[in-house]
Image (tube, rainbow, N blue to C red):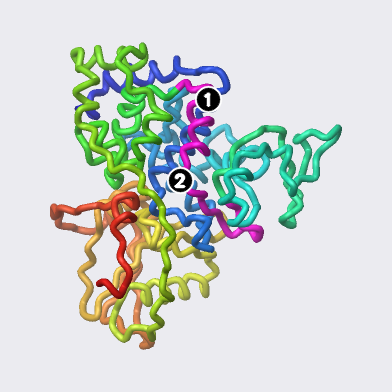
């Protein structure tokens, strides 16, 4: 097992990763890949016809790389540079604009976004094709990518000349983004491990898990096996082997293993028992069952009521309740950003917050708001109670529960038609 609470080991791991810069290596692209894999089950796929607001993804990526012991103005780790950045949206002394760490990396100009439709983004040929050869490209001066524009959206955004992979579908109306098939090794490995130089796994695991936010699974492990890492980041055995160096002969792995008292990497690998990526067979999906709105409290109605109240008050609101980011509503009004968690009950409400929700409340402080509705009944007038910074202002009781998480790769091969249920 790889310990996660050793500060000295963390310092060595960071220094080791700073030395790791092979040819064509793009650290920010690797961080985006890891984030997309980590949140794979919470980000809409291109097949879903839905999109996640870009600002929400920025917050999710901040959460993955933020270190809990550091101030939000300097907490988001770039392990390949050994540097810390402010959380997105924070304006720090010396900067003219609020922090914008991720947006350029998934927008068109220099990122992994693409405005093509889902059909094209499911085509291996289209995904593998260089952007300079894209049929939707109006090339720049002298036939180059730099200065070129995409003719799909009504946008004046121009390429900056960087050839990047197509990992995200961008909504043409700017409403958000969705991910391509995250199981496609050939779409990610050449960019995560350019020219076959794979990421050293041991120092990377130490960097990711040390001092991680308590609301994340990465912040709840005092020791990590390769099996844990693969499960937490939704990695098939093929993706793990293609992108990560698990060799004890690697000088980067060996340096950190020596700090662990000469732990044998073979022992860590011996714990590996991955669910192999399933073979996707054609599935006939029956039409959904249409039902009337529930007459009892489901949570969704309460979210809509709070969303309506916020919209009436002038907030721009995105419902992210299905994204498991620790809150239900992401709201912006002027220069203010707030994170609303909705709790309701058909009687008097004693809200139960998950570890992820509580971690988000601790992290966001006065920007996190608990919206509580007592005696809730859909369609009836009700009162909403707003609690700012519940982690600091509310007396709570901590309870421990065991949960069993099944990744998508773990259930996809076990599906059955409704008739067999």
Residue at 80 percent across and 45 percent down: it is 138
**Residue 164 picture location, percent across and down:** 61, 36
Residue for point 20% across, 13% down = 262
Q: Is residue 391 above or below residue 108?
A: below
For the question of whether residue 224 can be seen, the reply is: no
- Region rendered in magenta: 169-197
Q: Relative to residue 295, is residue 3 drawn left or right?
A: left
Q: Is residue 282 left or right of residue 223?
A: right
Residue 130's label in the rendered image is none
Q: Which dot marks residue 182? A: 2
Residue 22: x %, y % from top left: 51, 17
Q: Earlier in the sequence, mark 2 or mark 1?
A: 2
Residue marked by disc 1: 194
**Magenta-colored stretch includes residue 193:** yes
Residue 230 belongs to the span the image colors magenta: no
Question: Quarter of the image containing the N terminus?
Answer: top left
């Amino acid at each position: 097992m790889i310990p996660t609470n050793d500060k000295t080991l963390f310092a060595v791991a960071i220094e080791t990763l700073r030395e790791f810069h092979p040819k064509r290596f793009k650290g920010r692209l690797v961080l985006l890949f890891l984030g997309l894999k980590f949140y794979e089950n919470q980000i809409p796929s291109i097949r879903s016809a839905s999109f996640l607001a870009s600002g929400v993804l920025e917050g999710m990526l901040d959460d993955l790389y933020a270190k809990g012991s550091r101030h939000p103005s300097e907490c988001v780790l770039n392990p390949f540079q050994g540097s810390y950045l402010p959380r997105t949206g924070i304006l720090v002394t010396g900067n003219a604009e609020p922090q914008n760490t991720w947006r350029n990396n998934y927008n068109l100009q220099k990122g992994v976004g693409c405005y093509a439709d889902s059909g094209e983004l499911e085509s291996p040929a289209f995904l593998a094709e260089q952007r300079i050869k894209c049929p939707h490209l109006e090339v720049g001066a002298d036939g180059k990518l730099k200065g070129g524009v995409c003719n799909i959206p009504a946008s004046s955004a121009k390429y900056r000349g960087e050839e990047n992979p197509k990992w995200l579908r961008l909504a043409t109306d700017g409403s958000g983004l969705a991910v391509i098939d995250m199981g496609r090794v050939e779409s990610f490995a050449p960019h995560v491990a350019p020219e076959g130089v794979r990421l050293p796994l041991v120092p990377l695991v130490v960097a990711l898990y040390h001092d991680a936010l308590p609301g994340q699974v990465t912040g709840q492990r005092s020791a990590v096996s390769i099996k844990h890492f693969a499960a937490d980041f939704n990695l098939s055995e093929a993706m793990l082997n293609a992108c990560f160096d698990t060799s004890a002969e690697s000088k980067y792995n060996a340096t950190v293993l020596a700090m662990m008292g000469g732990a044998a990497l073979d022992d860590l690998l011996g714990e590996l028992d991955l669910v192999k990526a399933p073979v996707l067979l054609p599935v006939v999906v029956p039409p959904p069952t249409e039902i009337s709105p529930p007459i009892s409290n489901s949570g969704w109605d309460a979210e809509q009521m709070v969303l309506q109240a916020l919209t009436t008050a002038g907030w721009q609101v995105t419902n992210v309740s299905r994204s498991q980011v620790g809150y239900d509503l992401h709201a912006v009004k002027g220069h203010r950003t707030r994170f609303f968690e909705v709790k309701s009950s058909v009687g008097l409400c004693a809200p139960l917050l998950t570890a992820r929700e509580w971690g988000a409340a601790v992290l966001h402080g006065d920007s996190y708001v608990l919206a509580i509705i007592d005696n809730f009944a859909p369609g009836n007038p009700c009162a909403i109670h707003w609690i700012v910074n519940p982690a600091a202002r509310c007396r709570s009781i901590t309870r421990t529960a065991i949960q069993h998480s099944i990744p998508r790769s773990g259930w996809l091969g076990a599906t059955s038609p409704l008739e067999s249920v």
